[in-house]
């Protein structure tokens, strides 16, 4: 299946070339395909904050390249460049708070830096580390796609209707996608009749990005308002909800795009299975439970305005952009190290001791 998945890779959102990070500007999709060139850590941090690039894995990869840009600039400036680089680590780490891949990628860059900082030329090694983070995410996507398909096949006949939330495809990752990777692979295997896509208010990752990715692949897709999800589970024969994750705690609680938690509650009520697909770089074993995951709150304008036009009344706004789904509502967490069914702390600890399967 791997070769078929590789052949199906089309969209690319992150491009590192000529010492510059090029990011496909996701704020303008699906109508305009424009790229933002980042030549400094500050520009990368701003691109993450303003959602030029989004999706936990893509944010982590971008931050790693951002650190390469920072190291180049600090090294060239001379003096105590390692001390100066700490400001860039902090700037990138502050860009978005919830996704675990950002901190994981910066930690990997720091570990590599510690090993090479005394070399006459440490920059090549840092660039190689960022490229390896990028490539390993791509590989993890392929492995997870196969494992997710196997899981669906084990549990149910075909073809089937799936429901997804937010965007977890090529735009959100370094490769084929996490949850959307599983869905795209299941389609290639002839296992999908239709994919129901939540619009994903307020930023519309579902209607603008996921619907676009699925339609470009020729996959039958139906867009729905987030509030229609329970009704769809009840009436449209949905067998699996398949979503990604921004951070997974040590007990298997999952932070993902706001609205995921209510999908899981509804899935349990309707006997629909609930699958989370995320690489091990999203799992944060330092956080005992989902209560410890910081939840990003974004600007009130995201709710009060539509396409730049004011639509909401002048009231206080609460705009958390992620929520936490408790582990006991999750049927399976699919990672590149394997699948954890009915996750709990002991199973997550066992998973993290395993090697990657690719
Ligand atoms: C492979 S992407 C997984 C998650 O990052 C995704 O589901 C999500 O919630 C993205 O949120 P976003 O705010 O668009 O960055």
Image (cartoon, helix red, strand yellow):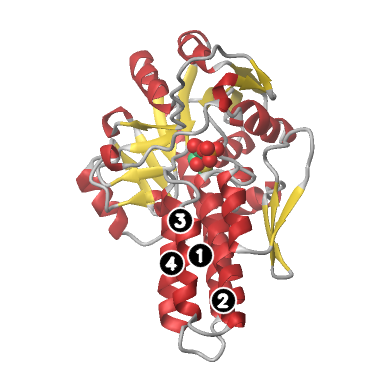
Q: Earlier in the sequence, mark 3 or mark 2?
A: 2
Q: Residue furthest front?
A: 314
Task: Please report contact status of discs 2 and 1: CB closer than 8 Å, yes or no.
Answer: yes
Residue 236 shows in the view: yes
- Of labels 1 and 4, earlier in sequence is 1
Q: Is mark 1 within 8 Å of ligand 1?
A: no
Mark 2, residue position: 74
Badge 2 crowding class, 10 Å Cα cut-off, few under 14, some 14 to 19, many 20 or more, is: some
Label 4 – label 3 distance at C-alpha? 13 Å
In the picture of the structure, the residue carrying the numbered disc 4 is 108
Q: Residue at x 39, y 25 (%)?
A: 273
Name which residue lies at 57% across and 15% down.
225
Q: Report helix, strand or loop for mark 1.
A: helix
Position of 155 relative to 252 (above/below): above
Q: Secondary structure at mark 4?
A: helix
Label 2 with label 4: CB-CB less than 8 Å = no
Residue at screen point 43% across, 24% down: 318
Q: How far apart are the alpha carbons under marks 1 and 3?
A: 8 Å
Q: Label 2 to label 1, Cα distance in Å?
A: 9 Å
In this rendering, the label closer to the viewer, 1 or 4: 1
The residue that disc 3 covers is 93
Residue 194, x across and y down, in percent: 61, 22
Q: Which residue is mark 1?
A: 88
- The answer to whether 92 is drawn above or below residue 151 in the figure is below
As measured in the structure, the alpha-carbon distance from the residue carrying label 1 to the one carrying label 4 is 15 Å
């Amino acid at each position: 299946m791997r070769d078929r998945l590789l052949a199906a890779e089309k969209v690319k959102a992150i491009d590192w070339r000529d010492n510059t990070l090029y990011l496909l500007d996701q704020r303008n999709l699906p109508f305009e395909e424009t790229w933002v060139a980042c030549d400094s850590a500050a520009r990368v941090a701003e691109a993450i904050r303003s959602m030029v690039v989004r999706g936990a894995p893509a944010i982590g990869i971008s931050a790693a390249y951002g650190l390469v840009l920072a190291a180049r600039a600090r090294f060239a400036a001379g003096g105590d460049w390692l001390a100066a680089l700490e400001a860039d680590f902090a700037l990138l780490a502050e860009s978005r708070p919830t996704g675990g891949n950002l901190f994981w990628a910066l930690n990997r860059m720091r570990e590599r830096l510690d090993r090479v900082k005394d070399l006459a030329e440490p920059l090549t090694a840092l660039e190689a580390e960022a490229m390896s983070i990028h490539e390993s995410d791509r590989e993890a996507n392929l492995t997870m796609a196969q494992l997710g398909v196997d899981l669906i096949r084990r549990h149910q006949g075909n073809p089937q209707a799936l429901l997804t939330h937010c965007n977890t495809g090529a735009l959100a990752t370094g490769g084929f996608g996490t949850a959307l990777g599983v869905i795209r692979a299941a389609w290639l295997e002839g296992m999908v009749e239709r994919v129901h896509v939540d619009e994903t208010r307020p930023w519309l990752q579902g209607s603008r990005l996921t619907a676009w990715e699925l339609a470009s692949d020729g996959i039958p897709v139906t867009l729905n308002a987030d509030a229609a999800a329970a009704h769809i589970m009840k009436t449209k024969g949905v067998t699996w909800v398949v979503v990604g994750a921004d951070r997974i705690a040590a007990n298997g609680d999952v932070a993902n795009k706001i609205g995921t938690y209510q999908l899981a509650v509804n899935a349990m009520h309707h006997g629909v299975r609930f699958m989370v697909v995320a690489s091990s770089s999203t799992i944060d074993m330092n956080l005992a439970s989902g209560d410890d995951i910081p939840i990003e709150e974004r600007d009130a304008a995201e709710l009060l305005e539509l396409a730049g036009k004011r639509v909401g009344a002048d009231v206080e706004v609460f705009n958390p952009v992620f929520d936490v789904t408790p582990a006991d509502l999750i049927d399976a967490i699919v990672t590149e190290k394997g699948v954890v069914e009915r996750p709990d702390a002991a199973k997550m600890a066992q998973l993290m001791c395993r090697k990657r399967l690719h």
